[in-house]
């Protein structure tokens, strides 16, 4: 019974033991260039089906209670000694878990930075919405795109995709507008030759 609860919602290559979950939590905190909250850690792990939601929440609580993690109002912090320990224990986790968690953390940080540095405004209209996506370079507006979409769901999808990879979005729009595909990952259109 306990094993079923521990593995509910977890991919076959995910973590099935509490020790592994605690190691992964500490590793994420150790390797993040951004301060992570308990919700961030839970979303990173559970969103990638690396461990069960309730087990992750329980592991965070145990790590805080045991003094292995300091809970600051801004996020979770690892004491210096535990940083070295987390780095040395990550090898005990399966390779697929390490790869998935590293990719998830990188994507999460890129998205968070993009959300902090760029803007998306969703303006409800009588019918549909107007979505304005702005790429900033410091305080200077680098590029802005505004479009009408038929529903709030489309607007939110555009916002999410914009924040997922703003740099790639800029490259693709630049390539389309200038015909210079050297910055884009898309192949050169043969009709331009």
Image (cartoon, rainbow, N blue to C red):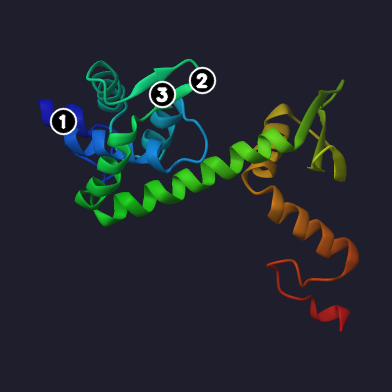
Picture quarter containing residue 38? top left
Give the SS element for disc 2: loop
- Disc ID at residue 38: 3
**Considering only order in the chain, which callout, 2 or 3, is on the residue closer to the N terminus?**
3
Residue 116, above or below 14: above
Residue 23, above or below 143: above
**Of 131 and 101, the residue lying toward us:** 101
Query: Residue at image x 26%, y 44%?
Result: 14
Image quadrant in which the C terminus is located: bottom right
> Measured from the top left, where is residue 140 in percent x and y?
87, 41
**Considering only order in the chain, which callout, 1 or 3, is on the residue closer to the N terminus?**
1
Residue 183, above or below 105: below
**Considering only order in the chain, which callout, 2 or 1, is on the residue closer to the N terminus?**
1
Point out the frontmost of discs 3 and 1: 3
**Of 137 and 43, the residue lying toward us:** 137
Point out the frontmost of discs 1 and 2: 2
Give the SS element for disc 1: helix
- Disc ID at residue 4: 1
**Mark 2 lies on residue:** 74
**Of 136 and 161, the residue lying toward us:** 136
Q: How far separated are the C-alphas under marks 3 and 1?
A: 24 Å
Picture quarter containing residue 133? top right
């Amino acid at each position: 019974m306990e094993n079923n609860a521990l593995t509910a919602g977890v991919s076959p290559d995910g973590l099935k033991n509490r020790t592994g979950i605690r190691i992964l939590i500490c590793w994420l905190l150790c390797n993040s260039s951004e301060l992570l909250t308990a919700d961030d850690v839970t979303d990173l792990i559970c969103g990638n089906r690396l461990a069960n939601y309730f087990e992750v929440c329980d592991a965070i609580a145990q790590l805080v209670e045991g003094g292995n993690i300091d809970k600051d109002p801004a996020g979770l912090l690892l004491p210096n000694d535990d940083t070295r320990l987390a780095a040395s224990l990550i090898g005990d986790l399966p390779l697929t878990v390490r790869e998935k968690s590293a990719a998830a953390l990188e994507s999460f940080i890129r998205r968070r930075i993009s959300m902090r540095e760029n803007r998306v405004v969703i303006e409800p209209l009588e019918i549909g919405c107007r979505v304005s996506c702005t790429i900033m370079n410091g305080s200077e507006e680098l590029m802005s795109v505004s479009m009408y979409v038929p529903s709030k769901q489309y607007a939110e999808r555009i916002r999410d995709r914009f924040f997922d990879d703003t740099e790639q979005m800029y490259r693709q729009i630049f390539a389309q507008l200038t015909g210079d595909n050297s910055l884009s990952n898309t192949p050169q259109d043969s009709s331009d030759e």
